Image (spheres, rainbow, N blue to C red):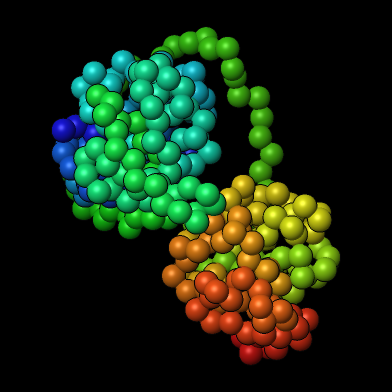
Amino acid sequence: MAILVVAEHDNAHLSNATHKTVTAAAKIGGDIDVLVAGHNAGDVAAEAAKIDGVRAVLHADGEALARQLAEAMQALIVPLMGDYDALLTPATTNGKNFLPRVAAALDVMQISEIVAVEAPDTFVRPIYAGNAMQTVKSSDAIKVITVRPTAFEAAKTGGSASVKSVDAPAGPFKSVFVSEELTKSDRPELTAAKIVISGGRGMGSGENFAMIERIADKLGAAVGASRAAVDAGFVPNDYQVGQTGKVVAPELYIAVGISGAIQHLAGMKDSKVIVAINKDEDAPIFQVADYGLVADLFKALPELEAAL
């Protein structure tokens, strides 16, 4: 069996999600190749070649691949799939964008956000906001899969795979990248942070999030929020953790003033240690918390900050 993993990267650095997707591929079994599609991404290809368990790295370099738009990725990947039995990519914004188009072109069903591999053709994925697990068995000749990175350990480095160039699609394509506006922060990126502290509706206002931010800076943590806090305008959309936000699994997750709706729990329940601060002792968040503090956050947070 041969598996192709599409690397997640920014043309300069390889994302840790790629290492975790390689781990998922190894659980399926067989030879693993990694496709690095980008522009001036030679360093990324060299980095991918060092992942343990990788047989070869396919490096496609071209301007059309700089942003991994769906049309260009389809034109690149589909012709390669004659040599592979499975195609895996992290369930990131990029992967969720181009993989459905690839699956449609291959005329197979996509299997989304797997969290476990039971057999080469059998996978486990969450449904109903993570409240149930569905076991899926695929009879398609080619398995097309997105992998939830938070569910797998990262593959180690130390390999020495060969790097082979493949032709990049020339285009032109109907869609083009126009621009992006990035939020700049000295704090770690939310989905990659080892510590996350999130605030909910109980914070009361955006100004009160300053209390969380000061603690985050002392802990080297990322700041998150519940959908209620985002919808109320307390913080920007990219802070949102949950089913319709970002899925995180840090070493430590601190939930402040968050009741714990199932949609939020779906985005953080795989965290190693969960701490909850809420004045409502019946809040659902306490059912998943390893440590719970029933207290007024406006008293507890200043005390926590002073202790730190």
Quarter placement of the N terminus: top left
Q: Residue at x 53, y 12 (%)?
A: 173
Q: Residue at x 50, y 23 (%)?
A: 70
Q: Residue at x 68, y 59 (%)?
A: 226
Asked if one can make out residue 37 in the rendered structure from this viewpoint, the answer is: no
Expressed as whole percent of the image width and height from the top left, the position of residue 144 reads 35, 31
In the displayed structure, 182 sits above or below 6; it is below
Q: Nearer the viewer, residue 146 or 162?
A: 146
In the displayed structure, 242 sits above or below 89; it is below
Q: Residue 11: name its quadrant.
A: top left
Expressed as whole percent of the image width and height from the top left, the position of residue 289 reads 53, 75
125 sits to left or right of 23: right
In the displayed structure, 260 sits above or below 55; it is below
Q: Residue at x 34, y 55 (%)?
A: 152
272 sits to left or right of 85: right
Q: Nearer the viewer, residue 59 or 250?
A: 250
Q: Nearer the viewer, residue 168 or 23?
A: 23
Expressed as whole percent of the image width and height from the top left, the position of residue 63 reads 48, 21
Asked if one can make out residue 227 in the rendered structure from this viewpoint, the answer is: yes
